[in-house]
Image: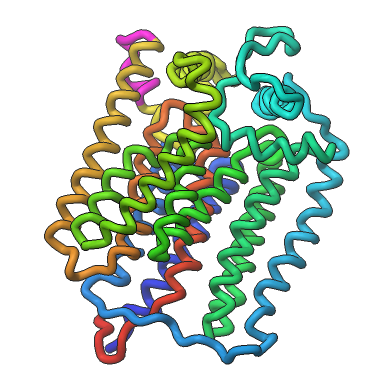
Amino acid sequence: MRIKFPLTITILFLLIVLENLCLYYFFRQGVWTTGKNALCLFFASLSFGLVFIYRFYNETIDPAPLGKKRNWLNYTNILLLLGGLYLIGIPYNEFFLERDIYPGNSDIIPIIQVACKRFVAGNYPYGAVTTFGWASEVLYLPMHWMPFSIAELFEIDYRWIPYGVWGIAGLILCVRAAKIANPVIRALVPLILLASNYVMFYSNNAIVEATVELMVAGYYMMLISGMNTGNGVLQGLIIGTCMLSRYSLVLWLPLYAFVLFVTGSRRQLYIATGTAVAMVMGLYVLPFLTRDPKLFSKLFGGYEGAAVYEWTHLNKAEQPIHLFSGTGFAYYFYTRFTGHSIPERIKLLQRTHLFVCLGVTALMCVWFWYKQNRIDKRIFLMGSFKIYLTFFLFLIQVPYEYLMCVGNFVSIALFCEQARYRFAKGTATV
């Protein structure tokens, strides 16, 4: 019986639903405790990556059937996304008008504002910030703040930039899906994107009010689309963008290089590597790091300082707020290693985080070395990134809810991109 195709795609869809429920409903409504919710969210995220790979493992795949050329019906999914972006943008706009950017809520966007004002004025963007009433410093990597220069130049609300980047990433997914003949798949792509954004906004609008994580989610959605091509320049640009926003994918990059190298895609690897390195040099090292060689080390010092603060920032139950939000395993280290000081427990979690992420990457390298003839390298790269990102996020020292929404949108991007394939006739298995 040829049931693997519809069964696995159904499971992938249900796992996305489960991720959203864990992020925005179960814990918030008191259905599950911190531990149960974090474990279920981890299970859903990890299972998505494993099922994604299993879906195409040991199968011969072809491109999905394409729709008829010059048929306007092929592009209704694009119109659906654009219409949805406009409709969701209405409550976004009302919310932004009601809520000013305020450092007391979060200093993420205010610090970015300082960097952009300096940059647009032709000044060095990094350095101390003395306008908030407490000690701060601009430390973010360039692609975490530089896109907001558009908002500074055109005098628009900075919070539209993450929404815009996320919308562009969604548009890319829809344009790529527009070529697929299956109308159900074409419609699902914008609907699942818009639904997840809508649920996120109405359940936790602080994500869009005080953070820029929608922009990072957009970067990673573009990364998934880029990995599903053979374009080295495109992959290098997206990898460089991701590296210059958050360092999350750095420990996964050796796997990316290994897969391309052993499968004979070495020219693509060299082009992607050269493009990413040139981007990092041109946007960070030469203009900024050469002026302050300690800038990168200060970034990690800032993360450690923030971690100590969050581990001692307690709620009414005398628990660290963001450790006991049902989104990661930092709470376990906080409660189980009470014989150590807070900084010692953070260090233990950091070492565990590094060891596990490196171990997962190494294990997937070994697996691919022996199974490379049974799975397409593009499928493996996309699925392996989801698996790696799951461990990275859930063992991070402060598992903010806004960080976890990135993993959710990566799942959606994977769901969209896998629709570009079908099993070759006669190869699908039970």
Q: Quadrant of residue 333?
A: top left
Please indicate whether residue 275 sits to the left or right of residue 117 in the image. Answer: left
Specify whether residue 376 is painted magenta. no
Q: Residue furthest left?
A: 370
Q: Which of the pair 216/336 is nearer the observer?
A: 216
Is 409 located above or below residue 131 in the figure? below
The span picked out in magenta is 333-341
Picture quarter containing residue 186? bottom right
Quick check: 268 above or below 122? below
Taking the spot 83% from the left edge, 54% from the top edge, the residue there is 90
Q: Residue at x 51, y 35 (%)?
A: 282
Residue 319 in view of the camera: no
360 vs 400, left or right, is left
Quadrant including the C terminus: bottom left
Q: Residue 400 placed where, x, y %?
A: 53, 33
Quadrant of the drawing holding the N terminus: bottom left
Residue 168: give x, y in percent of width and height. 64, 57
Residue at horizontal 58 percent and vertical 72 percent from the top: 188
